[in-house]
Amino acid sequence: MELLEVIKSLSNETRLNILTWLKDPFDHFPKEELSEETPELGVCVSDIAKKAGMSVPTVSDYLKTMSVANVLIATRRGQWTYYKRNEQLIQDLAKHIKEIL
């Protein structure tokens, strides 16, 4: 884990909101927008952008930043990209903060 890269990827209120929303998508996104495959795939970029009230390109940039830092896992399905949390990295980050910082 590149700690500084992870922290930088989270240093934005919208990115932190996205991380929170993806923790339990069914609590934060309309059920009709979520496919049955959502637990495996995550949530589509366009649905995240709609929830954030931002343009798809802006949210895509945020998601890419978080994905490069391995905070999120991207899955491409046809023309759509879905994102979900990297729970292992998030657990490692919490442990690191608790034990080292």
Image: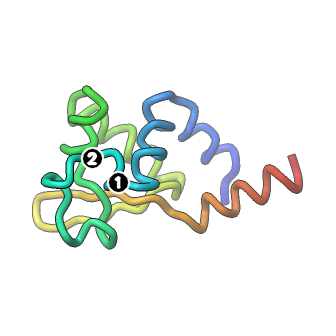
Give the percent coordinates (x, y) of residue 81: 23, 57
Q: How many marks?
A: 2
Label disc, if present, on residue 29 of the rendered structure: 2
Label disc, if present, on residue 45 of the rendered structure: none
Callout 2–callout 1 Cβ contact below 8 Å: yes
The residue depicted at 59 percent of the width and 68 percent of the height is 88
Give the percent coordinates (x, y) of residue 45: 24, 47
**Which image quarter: residue 84?**
bottom left
Q: Is residue 95 left or right of residue 83?
A: right
Q: Is residue 88 above or below residue 15?
A: below
Q: Secondary structure at mark 1?
A: helix
Q: Is residue 17 left or right of residue 59?
A: right
The residue depicted at 61 percent of the width and 58 percent of the height is 90
Q: Is residue 14 left or right of residue 52?
A: right
State the residue in front, 64 or 87: 87
The residue depicted at 47 percent of the width and 53 percent of the height is 68
Give the percent coordinates (x, y) of residue 23: 46, 54
Give the percent coordinates (x, y) of residue 73: 41, 62
**What's the amino acid at mark 1?**
Pro
Q: Is residue 30 above or below residue 93?
A: above
Q: Is residue 39 left or right of residue 71?
A: left
Q: CA distance from mark 2 to mark 1?
A: 6 Å
State the residue in front, 97 or 69: 97
Determine which residue is flagged by label 1. 25
The N terminus - image quarter: bottom right
**What's the amino acid at mark 2?**
Phe
Q: How is the image coloured?
A: rainbow
Q: Secondary structure at mark 2?
A: loop
Q: Is residue 95 above or below residue 56?
A: below
